[in-house]
Image: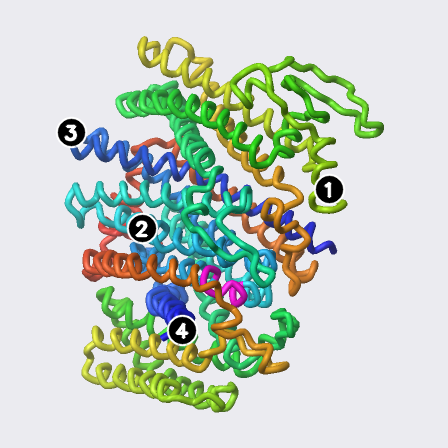
Amino acid sequence: MDVLLLARLQFAITIIYHFFFVPLTLGLSLVVAILETIYVSTGKENYKRLTKFWGKLLLINFAMGVVTGIVQEFQFGMSWSEYSRFVGDIFGAPLAIEALVAFFLESTFLGVWVFGWDKLSKGLHLTSMWLVAIGSNISAIWILIANAFMQHPVGYTITDGRAELTNFAQVIFNLPIFSHYPHVFSAGLVTVAFFMLGISAYHILRQNEIDLFKPSFRLAAIIGVIGTVMVGVIGHTQGQEINQTQPMKLASLEALFDTENPASLSIITIKNPFNDSLILDLRIPGALSFMEYNRFTGEVKGINQLQAQYEQQYGPGDYVPPPVILYWSFRAMVGAGLLMILISLVALFIDLRNLYGKYPWFFKLLPWAIALPYLANTTGWILTEVGRFPWVVYGVVDLQAGVSKAVTGGMLLTSLIGFILVYGLLISATVYLMLKFAKAGPAVALEVSEEFTPSLVNPPEAQ
Amino acid sequence: MTLNTLWFIFIAILYTGFFVLEGFDFGVGILLPFLGKNDLQRRTIINTIGPHWDGNEVWLITAGGATFAAFPNWYATMFSGFYLPLFLLLIGLIIRGVAFEFRGKDENPRWRTLWDWCLFAGSLLPTILFPIAFANLVRGIPIDANMQYVGGFFNLLNPYALLAALAIGLLILLHGASFLSIKTTGEIEQKAKELIRWLWLLVLMMMIIFMVTSFFSTGVRQKLNVLSILFPVLGVLAILAAGYFLRKSQFGRVFLMTCMTVVFVVFTIFGFLYPQVMVSSLNPDWSLTIQNAASSATTLRLMTIVTLVFLPIVLLYQAWTYWIFRIRITSEAEKLTY
């Protein structure tokens, strides 16, 4: 079995799976903190129930994020040991700092929050949730700092065959981080907004606990509008950053085969895989230049020219990330994003005009729209990571040089199958629980573990 | 003291924190199906570690991250060399972590039984796998001139490693039982105390056998120093002290002493390792050491500052959480969270 292929496949599957849970934790911990703040400052019992209801869903999601995150930290050494040797001097630091500074904070205080309802003052309990929210976001920053080094290595020198740190400030304030973190943060806002819109709409449609779900819907609509617009604007600057740091990624995701000035933006491009001719190619002239330079002229390099340039620079090889994956991932992400801007605006309009109950089709649609942020989050990461091909560290370590030497194809196949099975079972359990609590609403969510039903006080075996 | 030695000590401290803290919650997890005879009792048992297990586990994440940052070659060789054991460990930690969250969220008895056993298996796997891994680090494994492990999976299951798994596994069990004895009331408390009485002598014997065997099964005799004698002796003294307090039925102190035993067992292993971090059984020159496995001085200096600032803060707030949740967990359903 091909070790490299299996190692890549396993990394792709486990990281996509991990990132399925991360954005919701980032956004939802913030929302729960906001809800509890309102409860503590106004004393309204409604907001306490809201805090507990959304908090319960946060806990299920958080647990999945934690356990799948451990796999990521171990996997660098397990399957990518040569990469780890090469970059450990730089890459290890942000990971260790993340654990020490952020992960301890969020994990410890989540435990305090869950168990501390009647053991802490209201203020301390509220502080715990804010620490969870802040910790989660600091976590994201350090992980993205580590990732930024892989996308755009800076602040290092090569000594004795490995990269050594020369300037940590450069590593922290690396160019990609300024667009990647805000992009991920606002993606978290979008995810929680659609998660809450969907669940709230489900209950509003059924006239269930309207006094709880209207405020949820309103908050979600506001966060949704802010988040979707933010994610788009930041995404735009991210495109310009990629043009500087990884022009090949840009050319591939735009299906720009030859350098153009002014560069056209592809609306749809389909290539015949057998003879390389274009079946369909619909483009807006000058639009890509505008995306990259905010004016209608400016050179954007094409795949063919970049491939030639890299062959000269790095030697013979294939430097083109699979354009089909990049092109369609990008369009899925942007398409979902635009659709979400529209839906958030409609939701906000409905709330401002108090049109609840007016457009039942819209409320029926919203639970399904929960899939949209997940689609955008996943395709966004595929774009970022697959677009780095063929490098593990851009321009420095290629994939083949990074993979473990002590690991065989058989081992990787075993773990790959193992992870797929376990992850498959867990996602079923997670979806089952999420659906159960989301559909049942606050009444049940608050009852099951806090105030126990009589049947549980005297468990069947004891009777 | 050089930066490299300092970092060796930091890593030792992080693993010590992990084994002491997560040690008792692994122990509790293993005891769960045996000491909890109905759902309510099992919930009580889970609730004793409920607020803490996640924070405890971060000690491992931090130890892993710190090894990556301070000794990249150690991290790379160990994690790729121990690929399959680590894969099993990850599966264990995954099913265990979600079991805490998932178990109580459905009333179906079969659902709960499923997660009880996940909690059990997820606690047992690391309890066995970590001692095996660490025993192999000190004993020596086939590592070639390029720092690559070339030994395969079954090479790791040698008699010394299995002895370590048994001895340390039993210690973890005792540690978990002594934690339960001070955190519960009634029937569970009684059963835990009974178990401690049964286990104590066994653990004492296993500890002595393990420490003595370690002297002969590892390369420690070539680099003997005060500490490599002191740590095992203190470990045995701590477990003896646990027996003394057990006779006087002072279970708080018994727990304190099982903590100390775990501390000195980990110190013993790291003391035997130093200044190597992974011993090569093929050629002593091919061993990984605190020099050839380490990061640059720049990185070590940076990480030292970060650690000296943040580790005390972490210790403070984690200690605070044990203070707020200090009272015993009673089997009153309305007060249980999980």
Q: Is residue B173 above or below residue B159?
A: above
Q: Position of residue A277 (x, y in %)?
A: 81, 23
Q: Which residue is mark 4?
A: B5
Residue type, numbered disc 4: Thr
Q: Nearer the viewer's eye, disc 4 or disc 2?
A: 4
**What separation in Å lies between label 3 and label 2 (alpha carbons)?**
27 Å
Is there a contact, CB below 8 Å, between mark 3 and mark 4?
Answer: no
Q: Specify the amino acid type for callout 1.
A: Gln
Q: Say whether residue A153 is left or right of residue A301.
A: left
The region drawn magenta spans B68-75
Q: Earlier in the sequence, mark 3 or mark 2?
A: 3
Camera sees residue A130: yes
Left or right, B241 with reference to A2:
left
Q: Give the main secondary structure of the magenta stretch.
A: helix
Q: Residues within 10 Å of mark 1 (few under 14, many from 20)?
A: few
Name the residue tied to disc 3. A42
Chain assignment, label 1:
A
Which residue lies under the disc numbered 1? A312
Q: Are marks 3 and 4 on the same chain?
A: no
